Image: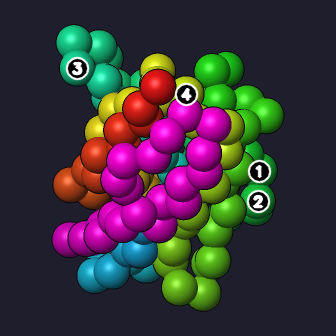
């Protein structure tokens, strides 16, 4: 099992920054990619950003130019720097990891951290 612990969510005013962190532990073995997804009330979960073990990144269209994903491979951690936050960024943010251990691939999710942006 792989456990993900997220931190950094909270309440922020529109235009402000916030930084999310996520650390993986347990039977990690090999991580292929780590990322962030979000889900607002009444909406589907959507991609925010993902970073692969080679450093390639991909962002959702609504956050490009405002959010930056990074990782510390040695610590199995991923970070999301969110700038110029908008009220529509309000959602529960979930950390995600894709990897493999002997015999199988795996996908794990964190418990989610609430981000609320006030106007």
Q: Label 4 neighbourhood size at 10 Å, few (<14), some (14-19), many (20+)?
A: some
- Look at the image and give the residue range highlighted in magenta: 1-21
Q: Are marks 1 and 2 in contact (CB under 8 Å)?
A: yes
Looking at marks 3 and 2 on the same chain, the residue that comes earlier in the sequence is marked by 3
Q: Which mark is residue 41?
A: 3
In the image, what residue occupies the spot 29% across and 52% down?
A: 113
Element assignment for label 2: loop
- Residue 47 circle label: none
Distance from disc 4 to disc 2, alpha carbons, whole Å, reads 27 Å
Image-based side of 119 in relation to 44, left or right:
right
Label 1 belongs to which residue? 56
State the SS at label 3. Answer: loop
Which residue bears the numbered disc 4? 86
Identify the residue shown where x is 63% and y is 21%: 62
Secondary structure found at label 4: loop
As drawn, which residue projects farthest toward the top?
42
Residue 79 position, x and y percent, is: 56, 63
CA separation in Å, label 4 and label 1: 26 Å
Q: Which residue is mark 2?
A: 55
Which label's residue is closer to the chain start, 3 or 1? 3
Residue 65: % across, % down: 79, 34
Disc 3 and disc 2 in contact, CB within 8 angstroms: no
Q: CA distance from mark 3 to mark 2?
A: 31 Å
Q: Nearer the viewer, residue 61 or 118?
A: 118
Whether residue 7 can be seen here: yes
């Amino acid at each position: 099992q792989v456990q993900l612990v997220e931190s950094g969510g909270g309440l922020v005013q529109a235009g402000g920054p916030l930084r999310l962190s996520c650390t993986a532990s347990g039977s990690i073995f090999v991580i292929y990619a780590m990322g962030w997804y979000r889900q607002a009330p009444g909406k589907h979960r959507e991609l925010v950003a993902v970073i692969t073990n080679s450093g390639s990144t991909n962002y959702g269209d609504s956050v490009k130019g405002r959010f930056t994903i990074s990782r510390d491979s040695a610590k199995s951690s991923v970070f999301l720097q969110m700038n110029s936050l908008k009220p529509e960024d309000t959602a529960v943010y979930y950390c995600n990891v894709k990897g493999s251990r002997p015999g199988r691939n795996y996908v794990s999710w964190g418990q989610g951290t609430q981000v609320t942006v006030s106007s």
